[in-house]
Structure formats: structure tokens, C-alpha cells
Amino acid sequence: MLNPKLKLNTKIFNDDVEQIPIRKGFGEGLALAGEINKNVVALCADLTESTQMHLFKDKFPKRFIEIGVAEQNLVTVASGIAAMGKIPFCSSYAMFSPGRNWEQIRTTIAYNDRPVKIVGSHAGISVGPDGGTHQALEDIALMRVMPNMDVISPCDAIEAKKATLLLAKTKKPAYLRLAREKTSIITTEDTPFEIGKAQIFWVPDVGLAQVGIIVTGSLMYRALLAAKELETEGTRPGQQGGIKTKVMNLSSIVPIDTEAIITLAKECKAIITVEEHQVSGGMGSAVAEVLAQNYPVPMEFIGVQNLFGQSGSPDELIEHYGMGVKDIKKAVEKILKRKVAN
Amino acid sequence: MFLTEEKIKKLKKTANNIRQSIIEMLVEAKSGHTAGPLGMADVFTFFYFHVLKHNPKDPFWEGRDRVILSNGHICPVLYATMAHSGYFPVEELKTLRKFGTRLQGHPHREYMPWLENSSGPLGAGLSQAVGMALADRMDEKDKERFIYCFMSDGELDEGNSWEAIMLAGKNKLRNLITVVDRNNIQIDGYTEHIMPLEPLADKWRSFNWNVIEVGGHDFKFLNKAVEKAQENKDGPTVIIAHTIPGKGVKEFERDYKWHGIVPNKEQGEMALKELKEAAYSL
């Protein structure tokens, strides 16, 4: 069941669950952050509406800077603005920022310690028809390897809004990863959110969980559907009440909630990670680094298996590249066998 | 800016001292860059001892002009000039590039917090200066101070440089003054062989910059150039400073090979002797 402590959206499993693009939560959060703090400024590289930055621009035109199609300039100009005491958010598609301008981010923002917030929209395979050039599947790896860089990948629009408001208050560089497509609303305004804290969204009705599913970003909805189906279906013969899982929302990839991950591994003794990203170097790798050093358990990684994407609908692509509900369920069944073999 | 003959003499002496410090630092460090720092010694001396609004005793003073060094590899001239201005002891210059030093091989704010930026990878300094100038305009501080950016000619090969030049021209940033060290060399050879930049002044002009060309070793000319740049109300100004790489030491001058190597002990002694002899005649 949904963790009752977190005040999640009770209508999440209804057919008419509200769907909003995660990037829109960012746009609304930024406009609100602009009201709260006059030092919040915004820069964009010719994708103002796409990245939902127009919500800020319309309210604060003098605090918005149009950079043009120049992502290297986008982040380095932001570094200079931050040097004068401002909190710049700069947005583009994740494939171009941080995809194209990684070294500039490293030197002028992370190394230089300037509180610039890099917002990579249209991350993941669910970008869809635009095809492989526009589907950022490496950005978590690129950014989490960089010292002095927080990496946040919200699961829905409401969490994206909260993350944006929090990032506007921190004095650190950060990367905010956003998805393009409409995503089911999972959290509510009352769901707590903290940078560096993981949360358990799904818990067994009774007893301990057999598998821990750790998710970042837009695949959370699918992971919750999988958890629900596993619990009610009872896919393993002879087992009553199906498979019990816990689903963790790891939207804060850096800093990572080491303690919560170890606690989950101790309870479940098997972990699956789920992300719209290459499996190498992504959130799953970050979890593996934590567990290998502290409490090794069998793991399965749901994500893109060292491939580029292609055109298609988001659903088609998520299924094709093995990140759908049935793939998550299959991974759970597989890891249960591995667990027994251990 | 009022510049007397007496002040010019003083500036010349200071620049000579800074060049001596650069040689001493590089010999001690056993690695680094020689031609650029020596070539820009007069320009840095002129700015730190005549142009800049700054206070070495209060380095974080809010009203200070901002200085961005884009081509971080010439940092020996920045460090030496800052030490001679009183930011830190001249003796500390000998720690350049050594473990635990504040004087990193390429400048880093974490180790020396009163630097405005960390730099090394080329082509990213001007855009930071553009960001600073934009921020000051937003806060209506663009008439109170200038943002200065020192950059090299070689780093104009970088696309990021031109992205910044385009944005500054678009926004008519009159509070932004850039000095290009036009020394015609880069690591692999002469700029016009590696990647021709000419007609350089026309290129900047076509991006809506005010362009001033000046000899980079004459304080009177530099003074006029900076005055003109500060008085310009239309937009950003670039001062293309024609300098001699390795200036001050005959054996190093104009030879691109001295871009990325340093003098050994004997070459250092020879260079110091030449600089000291030049100082007597000042």
C-alpha cells in the first residue's frame, strides 16, 4: 500500500489520475522562487517555453536572460551572474546542458563553487518522437561524478516544484533533471521533501518486504503499479498475498541517503533500481556503490542497456528498452530466485 | 586618468620587479608558462597600480572593480602583480605549483578566495565577465564600476569566446572592458599559422564591440586606451593589446616555444641579470 505517513496522492491508481509534465512543476516553482527572492534569475538557451521557464520570464522579464542557442555560454554567463550574489537557474534540454557544456559546468560552476542551478529538461527515453539525439541517457552519470554538484531527479511535477524552491535557497551548484512527458501525480503538497533524503512510497500491508525497488524520476509511477500488481497477483505459486515490496523514491541522487538504502537492503536482501538512464553510471550504480561497500545484496538494474534511443511514443520506447511495468515485475521475480540461490 | 612622467617611471620599475618575480617563480616551479606572463607584465602593472578600483587590504570590498582572468595559464603575472600590490607576501610567490600552495598551477578560488574566478580551460572567462556585467546592470550598478576581462588571442579559437562576444554586443554592455593579449603565439606555433584570427579588430567590430588597438608596453598609450574604453557609452569595449611574448628577456621574446616552457636555473639567472640591468637604467 502507499505509505500512509507521506500523504501521497490517494487517487494515483485511478484511471483518471491527474497527469502533469515534471518540467511544469519546475516552471511554477521557479516563478514562485522569483517572488520569494529577488536574487533568483533565469537564463535560457532558446527553449524558454519548452523548459517552462516562460512562467518566470513573464513575471520577471528584467531578471530573465535569453542566451540564444549557446549552451556553453549559458552556464558560464550564469557563473558570472552567480559571482555577483545571484541565484541563476539555467535551462535547456539535458542533452545540450549538461550534455554539451560539461567542462564549462565543471570549471566555472562546480570547481569555481558558484551556486548555479543547471536544469536539464527532456531527459530520458520518454522524450519520444524527437529520437536518440534528444534523449539524454547519460546525464545523471555526467553530473554525479562531478564534485560539489547536487543531483536531483524528481518523480512528479509537485516534487519538481518543491525541489526548485529548495534549490533556490541552497548556496551550492546543483543539477535538476526533468522529463518532458505528462507524468501521473504521485505526491501531494503535503508530502515532505528534503534534499539528501530518500522516502519509501510503497510498503507491504503487513510484514517485511522481500524486494526493495529503488526508483528515480519519471518511472516512479510504473514502479508503484508494478509493486501493487505484484502484491495482489501473487505471481509465485503457493505464495499467499503475492510478493511484498518496498518502493523507495530516490530523487536526491547526490547527496545520496546512504542510511536509508542500507536499511532497505537489510530488510529486503535484494534490490532493484529503476531509472530512465543508461544502467552504467546512473542512479543504480550510485546505489550499488553504497551497497557494495556497506551491505552487498543481489541487485538488478532497470534502465537502458548501453544503447542509444530512437523515435517512437514514450510508452513504446519505455517498453522496448525494458523499463515498463512488466519488466520491473520480471526483475523482481528474477531477483527472488537469485535471493533463494544465495 | 592623470598619468605623470614620475608615475610612468614608477610603473616601469614595478613592471620590472614583477618580471623578476615571474622568472624566480618559474625557475623554482620548474614548470608553467613564460612568454604570456612576461608579455602581459606591463598591462597587469598598469591595471593594478593605476586603473583598478581595488583594495588589497580589503579584498572583498563590495565596490571593487571585478577582474576576470580567462587564460589562467598566465597566472604567474597575476600572482606576482597581486603580491606586489599587497594582497599577500611576495615571498609566497616561490610556492607556485607546489603541494599545498595557494598559488595553484592554474588559478583556483578555493585556494585563493579573493580571485574572482578559477580558470585554465580556455574560452570561458569572457562569458563569466559578461554575466557579471549583466548582473550589475540588473542591479543598476553598471555605472559604479567596471568588469575587466583579460584574455588571450589563442583562446579566440574557442567557440565559447564568440558566444560571449555575441551576447555582450547584443546587450550593449558598456560596463564591460576586455583586454586581448595579442601576442600572436599559441602552443603549436604562431596564431596566424595555427588558426588565423585576422582581421581581428573587424571581427570584434562586426559583433558590435567598440575596438581599440594599442601597444601593450607603453603606459601612455595604455592610459589613453583605457580612458577611451571607460568613456565609451555605447557598448562593450575590447582593447587589443599588441604585446611581445617573453617581453623583457631578449632570448625569450617573440618565440612561440617559450609559451609553455620555463627557464632552467642558468637561463633564469641570465634573465634576471638582463632585467636587473634594465632596472638600473630606469
Image (cartoon, rainbow, N blue to C red):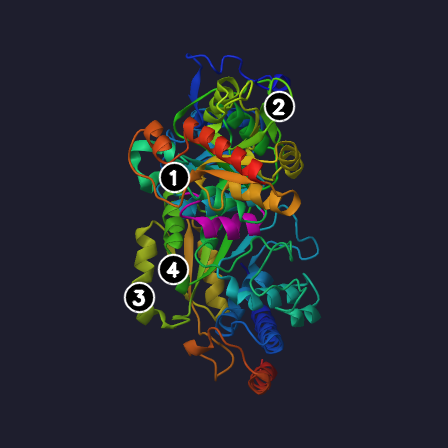
Nearer to the camera, A280 or B266: A280
Which amino acid does the dot numbered 4 rest on?
Leu
Q: Residue at x 48, y 57 (%)?
A: B227
Chain letter, disc 3 residue: B
Badge 1 or badge 2: first in the primary sequence: 1
**Outermost residue toward the front in this view:** A238
- The residue beneath circle 4 is B156
Determine which quarter of the picture holds residue A53: top left
Residue B203 belongs to magenta span: no
Which amino acid does the dot numbered 3 rest on?
Pro
Question: Do pointers 2 and 3 mark residues of a single chain?
Answer: no
Label 2 crowd bin: few (<14), some (14–19), many (20+), radius 10 Å: some
Q: CB under 8 Å between callouts 3 and 4? A: no
Q: Mark 2 to mark 4: distance in Å?
A: 49 Å
- Vertical placement of A181 versus A90: above or below? above
Res. A38 visible in picture: no
- The residue beneath circle 2 is A192
